[in-house]
Image: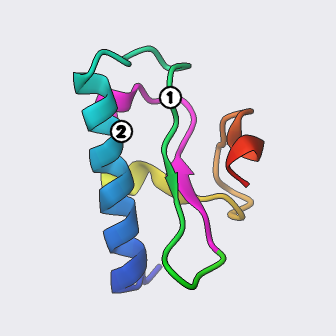
Amino acid sequence: MTISATAQSVREQVAWACRILALEGFSDLTLGHVSARPAGGDTIYIKRKGLALDEVGPDDVVEVDDPSATLHLETVIHT
């Protein structure tokens, strides 16, 4: 799968935001979710289910519309 530079940048930014939340004390799996949408785009990116915020890397950030992605129940809030 080829990922555009914009998508990769957004995935990296979401991963960094997750790790920042963890550094601020939000380390529980259920406290805080980060999502982002590239300017002018319709795709929403969010961390996949099953990872603590301090574990998230760019490869753990998925598209909300990806049918194979494992999403949090709270994902609907981000859409």
Residue 10's spot in the image, x, y percent? 39, 67
Q: Quadrant of residue 74?
A: top right
Asked if residue 9 lies left or right of residue 77, the reply is left
Q: Please tell me which residue lies in front, 48 or 13.
A: 13
Let me know if residue 45 is in the magenta part.
yes
Q: Residue at 68% across / 63% down in the picture?
A: 66
Q: Secondary structure at mark 2?
A: helix
Residue 26's spot in the image, x, y percent? 38, 19
Q: Earlier in the sequence, mark 2 or mark 1?
A: 2
Q: Residue at 43% across / 83% down in the picture?
A: 2
Residue 24's spot in the image, x, y percent? 26, 22
Tell me the tag on residue 32: 1
Residue closest to the far left = 23
Residue 70 higher or lower than 54, as above or below = below
Whether tag 2 and tag 1 are in contact, CB under 8 A, the answer is yes
Q: Secondary structure at mark 1?
A: loop
Residue 59 higher or lower than 55, as above or below = below
Q: Please tell me which residue lies in front, 30 or 1.
A: 30
Q: Amino acid at mark 2?
A: Cys
Q: Quadrant of residue 52?
A: top left
Asked if residue 40 lies left or right of residue 2, the reply is right
Counting the numbered discs, the total is 2
Q: Is residue 56 visible?
A: no
Tell me the tag on residue 18: 2
Let me know if residue 62 is in the magenta part.
no
Q: Which residues are magenta?
A: 43-55
Q: Residue at 26% across / 35% down in the picture?
A: 20
Q: Please tell me which residue lies in front, 14 or 49.
A: 14
